[in-house]
Image (cartoon, rainbow, N blue to C red):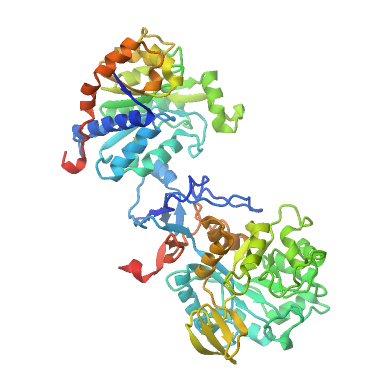
Amino acid sequence: MRSVLVPIVCFPGLAPARPVPWTSGPTHRPSRPPAPHPLECSVEDLWVRGGRILDPEKLFFEERRVADERQDCGGRILAPGFIDVQINGGFGVDFSQATEDVGSGVALVARRILSHGVTSFCPTLVTSPPEVYHKVVPQIPVKSGGPHGAGVLGLHLEGPFISREKRGAHPEAHLRSFEANAFQDLLATYGPLDNVRIVTLAPELGRSHEVIRELTARGICVSLGHSVADLRAAEDAVWSGATFITHLFNAMLPFHHRDPGIVGLLTSDRLPAGRCIFYGMIADGTHTNPAALRIAHRAHPQGLVLVTDAIPALGLGNGRHTLGQQEVEVDGLTAYVAGTKTLSGSIAPMDVCVRHFLQATGCSVESALEAASLHPAQLLGLEKSKGTLDFGADADFVVLDDSLHVQATYISGELVWQAEAARQ
Amino acid sequence: MRLVILDDYDLASEWAAKYICNRIIQFKPGQDRYFTLGLPTGSTPLGCYKKLIEYHKNGHLSFKYVKTFNMDEYVGLPRNHPESYHSYMWNNFFKHIDIDPNNAHILDGNAANLQAECDAFEKKIKEAGGIDLFVGGIGPDGHIAFNEPGSSLVSRTRLKTLAMDTILANAKYFDGDLSKVPTMALTVGVGTVMDAREVMILITGAHKAFALYKAIEEGVNHMWTVSAFQQHPRTIFVCDEDATLELRVKTVKYFKGLMHVHNKLVDPLFSMKDGN
């Protein structure tokens, strides 16, 4: 069988040679804890075979082969595909709605977010009654991406084991605490965990440590959020295995200098040696003030994970929409509860968040791209295959113009979305 | 012997690249007629490679019908080590041009039988019809390839132990750790290069000035192996002003006086676009 190599021009001289692998090879070999080495852009060809990124030097000297096919990217930027670990729905679809055909809703969103540069995501369910979990969770299996849509990495279950005070928009009636058989209670609520990748919980709930240990032992990432935990409780949760913070600043105690709360994890010196704490950031320009974004980024740039936390109004366009029992009015990148000025949730696509983040923090282009790709991949322990253009990684990548607008999206080396302008 | 003196490194690099380009195009390479090119590594030829890449990218020059043979490679250094000459050639030249990987020959310093590897390399050169143009650089001690001072001037491709000076100079590429620096290399011999139909030596920088003096103004001497090319019927030294600092004024003036003749070799610069 003839293998296809697709070399693509990448990184138009934004910086000197990349470290040996995003070249280099993409010389970019993130480890845990991630070394503070932001990947650098350089003019480089990206080679792909069999859906994975190939080391062309090895090919040249060992297989003595050249590319079968070349695609000119016009000197645009190539970056790892974006990964959204918190998205509640979009295009009118609410992942938390227990319909008979959850799959088609997820498929619709998966397909449409390709245009945002998202190549994989964690569909997120907000606090729901057990029967909803039992119905919905089995219907959203882990699934590879492709022309049909972005890949599903597993569900993010946000709640119901969260704080009553910091529940935000989560329905109070369905909140739960851990009872005597803490983990069994969680299993009874969620059902089988095969499709689950992230669980957001409040660590101050009794027996949470037992639950955190059980979840992390099963490879499920535990995120702290919707919580009134103080720093000590948050640190203890990290010692038990928690690695993520759900939408930093939102739905947690505000920063206080004598007890910085969960926010304090960003600079804590009481964490296990070498552990990197990741934190989700909604960089839509509305849900997090740019100054707060900068504080977090400057304190702990390696842990920043851009999330959309998008609600079903994502991608619906301006005007009034009915979503479940709620009337939502969309105006640009802001969604209000209809007739009010109350924010109803975020609707900024991932590529918009990347651009806003870049502009608000003044970070490097590489750092902005990593916050949407490498960091979420590291969070999920997928950094060898996703969120990187290292040799051997999945060829999930986006083609961006200099202002970071997505021109094309590739999954496993296959073109899955292209901007109108690029098609001509 | 020709000595071509340019004002600075960039101009010397460009002159050398133009010369190589014109030689390849004038040869009219084709499917049954490959141009064979010997190639060096090191910092000196980088500028020359950049220009050749530029000619290729602009469509003036193709390496489709060119076979290359590299001078040397370290022994025991992984092929993909950033300091290996495989990595050097890939990053600085091969990945930018259209050469067929089957035609790019570099000694394998990790071969199980190193002498057999060297013998096979000589055989491959012979099978390719010998080398049309061998491009080389030299070390401050006048070595060509890894033919360190004292090497036989009729040597063939073989395993060489590196001089301590070379090992010390290389340490900077290996975290300053002498224990990581390769101490042996496979290298073409002086005789291997002498067999080429034409030899071009690039010498730039004041630190190479004494070597250039030894190469052309004194006698043939195995302690300055590059001096062997005084005996080669077609050798061209390309240098910058700095490299002439140890030469006699008379020598420099004589060769500078010939520049208008030598420049005809590179002007006009041919292009494959012109159907040459």
- Where's residue A166, x and y in %? 74, 78
Side (left or right) of A311 relative to B140 = right
Side (left or right) of B246 relative to B184 = left
- Where's residue B17, x and y in %? 30, 32
Q: Quadrant of residue B51?
A: top left
Foreground pick, A217 / A418: A418
Q: Quadrant of residue B276?
A: top left
Asked if B157 appears above or below A349 in the picture, the reply is above
Measuring 16% from the left and 41% from the top, which residue is drawn there?
Answer: B275
- Where's residue B246, x and y in %? 41, 13
Q: Quadrant of the N terminus of chain A?
A: bottom left
Q: Quadrant of residue A324?
A: bottom right
Q: Residue furthest left?
A: B275
Say whether residue A87 is visible.
yes
- Where's residue B62, x and y in %? 26, 41
Side (left or right) of A30 relative to A68 = right
Say whether residue A386 is visible.
no
